[in-house]
Image: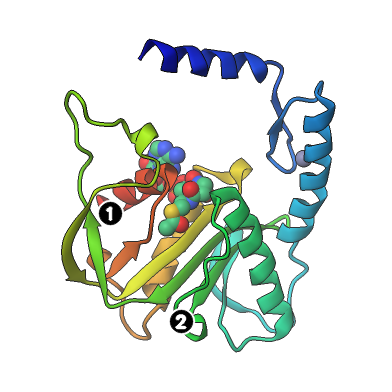
Amino acid sequence: KGTKEQLIIDAGQKHFGATMCKSCGMIYTPSSPEDELQHVQHHYRFLEGIKYTGWKKERVVAQFWDGKIVLVLPRDPSYAIRKVEDVQELVDNELGFHQVVPRCPNKTKTFLFISDEKKVVGCLIAEPIKQAFRVLSEPTGPGSPSSKECHRAWQCSDVPEPAVCGISRIWVFRLKRRKRIARRLVDTLRNCFMFGCFLKIDDIAFSDPTPDGKLFATKYCNT
Ligand code: ACO
Ligand code: ZN
């Protein structure tokens, strides 16, 4: 345990002087040329990726005081599909997903939260599923790995339960987190996934949740 703590402290010192860019949200050390270069490269690509110019035909499925949610379907015009692909690439980069091909691309529904500043600040990608495996509560007690070490290897039940809708990605721009954007995306998904019915919490499943995703899902599913 001692060595692990030491490692964390050392890493902290290396990042001494780190700042967060106020427009792209990247955390970097301006005094490090490498970091600075990485930031510049990320900065423009990211801001270009989340830029939303507005579409002639857009499917607005929810409207709020601070933005709106637009739904994109597989047969939409190519400009809409391209935007979804660009955003998904940024999201996958951040999540460390590499080339995960959606299981049924022709049934994928993508919800984009567009801020008043005309930026895509939230994204939810959902697909129909038939079953899911419940995440079991974390093992606790001496000898059990902490959630940090487990990364994504949450323990799952091996009993499949029926489900309707799988959330394969949920993401909110770092500078816009904790403003209930993810919550509003999931509420809107439940309202729009199947025509004429509001999905129950048990009908939805989060696939392979990250620690952030798990914290959000736990909170969302209990309220
Ligand atoms: N830590 C603790 N609680 C949290 C966190 C967190 N990081 N995020 C959300 N919650 C809980 C809170 O109780 C919050 O309510 P409160 O702010 O009133 O306390 C409640 O969930 C609702 O949160 P939102 O504001 O709706 O969530 P947000 O818009 O910040 O988005 C998200 C959450 C999407 C997980 C965001 O943190 C994110 O994009 N993280 C990085 C990407 C990621 O890991 N996505 C999940 C991948 S898993 C998958 O895609 C299936
Ligand atoms: Zn930046």
Residue sitting at x 84%, y 37%: 37
Q: Quadrant of the N terminus?
A: top left
Residue at the disc numbered 2? 104
Quadrant in the rendering for residue 200: bottom left
Task: Determine whether 199 is above or below 16 in the image.
Answer: below
Mark on residue 189? none
Whether residue 183 appears in this view of the structure is no
Q: In the rendering, at what x and y percent does residue 153 appear?
A: 33, 47
Q: Toward the viewer: 141 or 161?
A: 141
Of the residues shown, which amino acid type is indicated by label 1? Cys
Whether residue 126 appears in this view of the structure is yes
Question: Does residue 55 appear to the left or right of 8 in the view shown?
Answer: right
SS label for mark 1: helix
Residue sitting at x 74%, y 65%: 52
Task: Determine whether 53 is above or below 213 in the image.
Answer: below
Q: Toward the viewer: 38 or 46?
A: 38
First in sequence: mark 1 vs mark 2: 2
Which dot, 1 or 2, sits closer to the camera?
A: 2
Residue sitting at x 67%, y 16%: 16
Q: Report the Cα–Cα distance between label 1 and label 2.
A: 25 Å
Of the residues shown, which amino acid type is indicated by label 2? Cys
Q: Residues within 10 Å of mark 2 (few under 14, many from 20)?
A: few
Task: Determine whether 51 is above or below 96 in the image.
Answer: below
Residue at the disc numbered 1? 221
Question: Does residue 34 appear to the left or right of 213 in the view shown?
Answer: right
SS label for mark 2: loop
Q: In the rendering, at what x and y percent does residue 159 appear?
A: 14, 64
Residue sitting at x 83%, y 41%: 40
Q: Residues within 10 Å of mark 1 (few under 14, many from 20)?
A: few
What is the residue that sits farthest to the bottom in this orientation? Answer: 75
